[in-house]
């Protein structure tokens, strides 16, 4: 009640005017909050579209190159899902995980996670994703080996080492090409 002051006598008109002013301020605040909410939703939608576009761009740039890199190592993948694949529980059909790029043949499946800048947290999340994929494969009686790989444009030496120690192939941007980084003695983890 902004029109009321401590030392002034209260009158009905002053109290009523103050209540009406407060009511109008509350209405204006509600309108501003609605507009703010609308703006936040629109910005979130635009960020999501940008993120999806970047993810698709990265997958289209990465997929063709890494297929060749792995096939040159003798994998001979005959099935490639460059736009990713979602995985659900075989019994409940509940969504469990998504993989950006899937390379497979009758002996092995490599699940590739694509990140613009790789962090240790991303490596840990891919370990969890690989556990989920193995669980789903076991439920389907899929006895193939499951390996993981991470493709990235930006990576620190520490994070690269962490990814390798976690059993992942690392594919990284090197100038205009994607480079499959396999250190001496590297053994990929079987899931």
Image (cartoon, grey):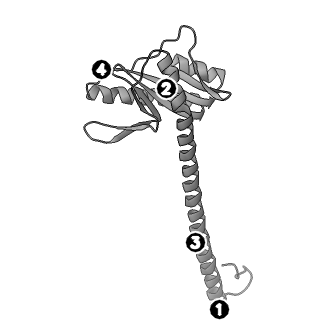
Quadrant hosting residue 137: top left
Who's the residue at 62% across and 91% down the image? Answer: 12
Element on which disc 4 rests: loop
The residue at 48%/12% (across/down) is: 187
Q: Look at discs 1 and 2 and give the one toward the viewer.
A: 2
Is there CB contact under 8 Å for labels 3 and 1?
no
SS assignment at label 2: helix
Q: Tell whether 90 sits left or right of 55.
A: left
1 or 2: tag closer to the N-terminus: 1
Going from N to C along the chain, the mark reached first, 4 or 3, is: 3
Crowding at label 1, few (<14), some or many (≥20) Cα neighbours within 10 Å? Answer: few
x, y percent for residue 169: 52, 20
The mark closer to the camera, 3 or 1, is 3
Q: Which residue is mark 4?
A: 143
In contact (CB < 8 Å): disc 1 and disc 4: no
* Residues at marks 1 and 2, CA–CA distance in whole angstroms: 80 Å
Q: Nearer the viewer, residue 151 or 104?
A: 104
Residue with the mark numbered 3: 30
**What residue is pinned by disc 1?**
13
Q: Is residue 89 left or right of residue 123?
A: left
- Could you tell me how far apart the alpha carbons at marks 4 and 3 are, in whole angstroms? 58 Å
The residue mark sitting in front, 1 or 4, is: 4
Residue at 56%, 63% in the rendered image: 37
Say which quarter of the image contains residue 41: bottom right
Compare residues 121 and 134 and report the one nearer the observer: 134
On residue 88, which mark appears? none
Q: Which mark, by number, is residue 67?
A: 2
**What's the CA distance linking mark 3 and mark 1?**
26 Å
- Dot 4 surroundings within 10 Å: few (below 14), some, or many (20 or more)? few
x and y percentages locating residue 176 in the rendered image: 66, 29
């Amino acid at each position: 009640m902004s029109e009321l002051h401590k030392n002034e006598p209260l009158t009905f008109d002053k109290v009523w005017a103050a209540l009406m002013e407060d009511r109008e301020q509350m209405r204006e605040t509600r309108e501003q909050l609605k507009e703010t909410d609308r703006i936040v939703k629109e910005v979130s939608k635009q960020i999501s579209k940008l993120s999806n576009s970047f993810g698709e761009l990265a997958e289209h740039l990465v997929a063709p190159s890494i297929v060749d890199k792995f096939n040159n190592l003798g994998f001979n993948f005959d099935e490639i899902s460059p736009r990713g694949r979602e995985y659900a529980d075989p019994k409940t059909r509940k969504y469990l995980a998504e993989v950006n790029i899937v390379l497979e043949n009758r002996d092995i499946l490599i699940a590739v996670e694509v990140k613009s800048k790789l962090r240790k947290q991303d490596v840990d999340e891919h370990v969890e994703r690989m556990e989920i994929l193995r669980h789903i494969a076991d439920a389907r009686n899929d006895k193939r080996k499951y390996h993981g790989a991470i493709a990235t444009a930006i990576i620190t030496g520490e994070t690269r080492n962490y990814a390798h120690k976690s059993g992942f192939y690392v594919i990284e941007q090197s100038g205009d090409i994607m480079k499959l980084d396999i250190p001496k003695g590297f053994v990929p983890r079987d899931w």
